[in-house]
Amino acid sequence: MRIAGLIDRVAVSVAGDEVAAEKPDPAVYLAAIEALDRSASGVVAIEDSVAGATSAVRAGLDVIAIERHPADLALLTAAGVRVVDRLEPALIGL
């Protein structure tokens, strides 16, 4: 996020070791939504793995995934995730 120039757009960050369950369980994203004190509507998750994208989808977030492995593209697309090949503000609409 810092390298892509997006760190100033991150309102909250929750790490996996701060919740009881691992991705693809939505616990980490549900904790982030709670920290934001808002609903999932309008919250965007940026992910680089199928498990992470699945976690965010299960929490009800909009998801942008960075494609790291071509084999994951079909899984991400089927989950309704927007897939990009790199993280750049203009490319993801920020």
Image (tube, helix red, strand yellow):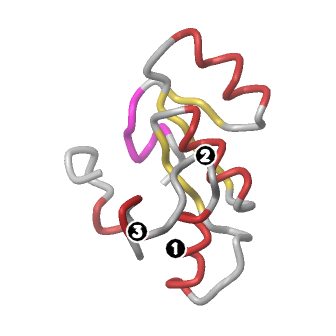
- Would you call the spot at circle 2 few (<14 residues within 10 Å), some (14-19), or many (20 or more)? some
Q: Earlier in the sequence, mark 2 or mark 3?
A: 3
Q: Residue at x 43, y 21 (%)?
A: 68
Residue at the extreme bottom of the image, as rendered: 37
Q: Residue at x 51, y 43 (%)?
A: 92
Q: Is 89 placed above or below 31 here? A: above
- Which residue position is annotated with label 3? 14
Residue 65 placed where, x, y %? Answer: 54, 37
Q: Are marks 1 and 3 in contact (CB under 8 Å)?
A: yes
7 lies left or right of 73: left
Q: Are marks 2 and 3 in contact (CB under 8 Å)?
A: no
Tell me the CA gap for discs 1 and 2. 15 Å
- Which residue position is annotated with label 1? 32
Q: Is 25 placed above or below 17 here? A: above
- Would you call the spot at circle 3 few (<14 residues within 10 Å), some (14-19), or many (20 or more)? some
13 lies left or right of 78: left
Q: Is 37 placed above or below 57 here? A: below
Q: Residue at x 47, y 69 (%)?
A: 19
Q: Disc 2 residue type?
A: Pro
Tell me the CA gap for discs 1 and 3. 6 Å
Q: Nearer the viewer, mark 2 or mark 3?
A: 2
Residue at the extreme front of the image, as rendered: 20
Q: Disc 3 residue type?
A: Val
Q: Residue at x 60, y 42 (%)?
A: 53
- Which residue position is annotated with label 2? 24
Rendering quarter of residue 33: bottom right
Q: Are marks 1 and 2 in contact (CB under 8 Å)?
A: no
Q: Is 93 placed above or below 80 here? A: below
Residue 87 falls within the magenta-colored stretch: yes
Numbered range of the magenta stretch: 86-91
Q: Disc 1 residue type?
A: Ala
